[in-house]
Image: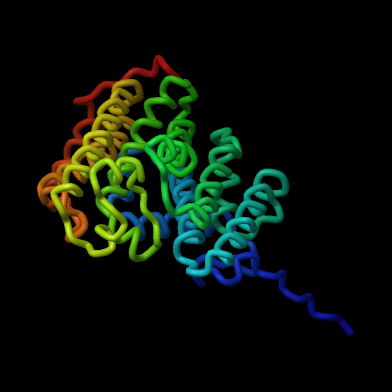
Amino acid sequence: MSTAIAPAPNRLAGAPPALLEPEVRPTLAEARQWCKTLAESHYENFHVATKLLPARLRPHFHAVYAFCRVSDDLGDEVPDRVLATHLLQNWRRMLVECFEEPQQSRHPVYVALHESIGACDLPMEPFTALIRAFEQDQVKTRFADMDELVSYSNDSANPVGRLVLMLCGYRSPDLFCLADETCTGLQLANFWQDVQEDLLERDRIYLPADRMAAHGVTETTLREGRSTPQFATLLQELVEDARARLLRGAALIDSVDSELAATLRLFSAGGLAILRGIERIGYNTLEQRPEVSRSEKLTLLFGAALGKIGIHRGSRGLR
């Protein structure tokens, strides 16, 4: 009499149901569709941004984005930080498996990602760095100064920009540095628009403690959700810092081919639009979230599309 084989334990047990490992390994086509659906359902401009890229690259972008999204959700959507840390550790083990024993991978992210790793010669370190950042989120919720924030961005944001460049065949250290400026600027812009949400929903304060003290802004100020002149001055200073990083990083757009440039322009301009939105509400992100208007979004998309069809011409000289 045959004995039924028990299904393998789900290494993501306790995560949101949509993120669990399937019992049966998906086909590559199924895995890529899973990643594409996840990417396009989480970020409204992602579908447009990837449409600006060559069709052959889109599945790779979907796979990398899905990895980032699931990693983020394991860290942020699991309220128990001990469990979240455990899940992220298992996710890291599954990443190593994807590189070293890919035939064992069952999660659609890793089935799809393995193909992208091979096709685009992607190293493990950027993926490891991202998981490391989400693990850090479980234990570190305050930042002493801007240096600590930039160090955090080196793991939590900058690997994404470097992966984007590598997906498109670029490996220049100079381009990586420009991408770092853009990604850090984007992350800071998002932090500054979500100050109270990060505190009340995640107990995290990304405002540098030394600058808060210099401007007379306390955690009590933030928890009360009441904007003060001191808070507005602090945020104005931080907005200018993020803008300077985005503008320095914008040099990357002129150093890549027009198709990638169109996508980079969209994300860079989106970050600058967030900062303008913060300015429009008088830096009062404790009481309201800045919005990028529909007309402004359409302008950004239109500008990116124009770049793709040839109004912008990039150089491939720094690959």
The one of 144 and 9 positioned closer to us in this rendering: 144
Q: Residue at x 54, y 54 (%)?
A: 109
Q: Position of residue 254 (x, y in %)?
A: 29, 22
Q: How is the image coloured?
A: rainbow
Residue drawn at point x = 25 percent, y = 39 percent: 238
* Number of numbered callouts drawn: 0
Q: Is residue 189 left or right of residue 128?
A: left
* Viewer-nearest residue: 292 or 308: 292
Q: Which residue is rendered at x = 11% and y = 48% of the image?
A: 282
Residue 292: image x %, image y %?
17, 50
Q: Is residue 56 above or below residue 5?
A: above
Residue 30, position as x, y percentages in the image:
53, 59
Task: Tell me the quarter of the image containing the C terminus.
Answer: top left
Query: Hey, which residue is sitting farthest right in the picture?
Result: 1
Of 18 and 118, nearer the camera is: 18
Judge whether 202 appears above or below 273 on screen: below
**At x 39% / y 30%, what residue is drawn?**
179
- Position of the N terminus, as image quadrant, is bottom right
Quarter of the image where one finds residue 11:
bottom right
Residue 26 in sight from this viewpoint: no
Q: Is residue 98 left or right of residue 19?
A: right
Relative placement, left or right, of 205 versus 289 is: right
| Res. 15 image quadrant | bottom right
Quarter assignment of residue 263: top left
